[in-house]
Image: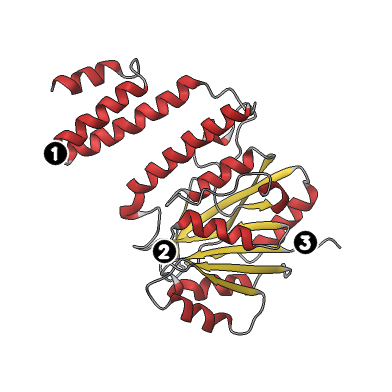
Amino acid sequence: MNTPLVSILVANYNNGNFFKDCYQSIIDQTYDNWEVIIVDDASTDNSVLVIKQIIGEDNRFKIFMNDKNKGCGYTKNKCALMANGEILGFLDPDDALKLNALELMVDLHIKNEGVAIITSKYDLVDLDMNFIKSTIHGNIVPLDKSYLTYGMGALTHFATFKQYKYKETIGIDPTMMRAVDQDLYYKMEEQGEHLFLDEVLYLYRIHEKSISANKNEFKAKYWHFYATVKAFERRTKLDLKIDNFSNSEIKKIKSNYYLSRFEREKANKRICPKYYFLVKSIIAFPSHKTKFKIRSLIK
């Protein structure tokens, strides 16, 4: 029976006190050929001590530590570099997997050799891992689209990808502070097919430290924008014919992003930054939302 090694990748920063539920969900998996690669990004709390106490002498868990805080992109990239598995998947230390997550993913990877990445769906849970609600994210990308042009949260947790396909990319951008998964999904899509599994396999815990939730949501939007622009530039340079993502579409995305920054600065009554982003929006795509831009300039 084919039982490829799965590397579960855990990038931690100050979330060690949530790790027990993450650990238990791994230990209880119905598929047992796995390893866990943990990279701690110079946590300022007792994360490393707590995690080491939880995993004990279990050599399936391998923990590494950054010498200083280097951010989410660097840490997740390091996780992938340290992995030995044929199949890789990220799991945040404050979240958990459904018990059959690895079994279902492995089965699909074996049956679909050309598939680069498989994604599924997730539920939101509270601090005690109690169900809050199901999300609308996770679905199939239409045949005439890619994740880059379609978006709409199609690719999301739980996601697993083939190691050899990942090595054909330039890897996760180590400079990114947020939206690192977005960057990964774009790059894996460029290496092969995407397969969607219509099952909830991941439990996403909501709390004040969540990197893309709550007060961090606005910061995450910038990094999503950054990842999208970089993906467009990369695909244009490599002449990848994934879909018909035109230059006007990327200009529209840039213009809309700068307009969102304009609206934020306007609400905060910051005059110079407000007009800076308005001008950036005009330069990005002069003919997009022209009337709105003109009215904003003269007000």
**Which percent across, then down, holds residue 174?**
50, 52
| Residue beneath the point at 58% across and 55% down | 158
Seen from the viewer's position, the closer of residues 98 and 19 is: 19
The answer to which of marks 2 and 3 sits earlier in the sequence is: 3
User: How packed is label 2: few (under 14 Cα within 10 Å), some, or many (20 or more)?
Assistant: some
The reply to whether callout 2 and callout 1 are in contact (CB within 8 Å) is no
Amino acid found under the numbered disc labelled 2: Asn
Q: Secondary structure at mark 1?
A: loop
Figure quadrant of the C terminus: top left
**Which percent across, then down, holds residue 124?**
46, 58
Q: Secondary structure at mark 2?
A: loop
Find the distance from the CA under tag 3 to the CA under tag 1.
56 Å
Which residue corresponds to mark 1?
A: 269
The answer to whether 282 is drawn above or below residue 198 in the figure is above
Which residue corresponds to mark 3?
A: 4
The answer to whether 268 is drawn above or below residue 298 in the figure is below
Asked if residue 123 lies left or right of residue 269, the reply is right
Which residue corresponds to mark 2?
A: 69
**Which percent across, then down, holds residue 262?**
25, 33
Image mark for residue 101: none
Asked if residue 181 lies left or right of residue 215, the reply is right
Amino acid found under the numbered disc labelled 3: Pro
| Residue beneath the point at 57% across and 27% down | 236
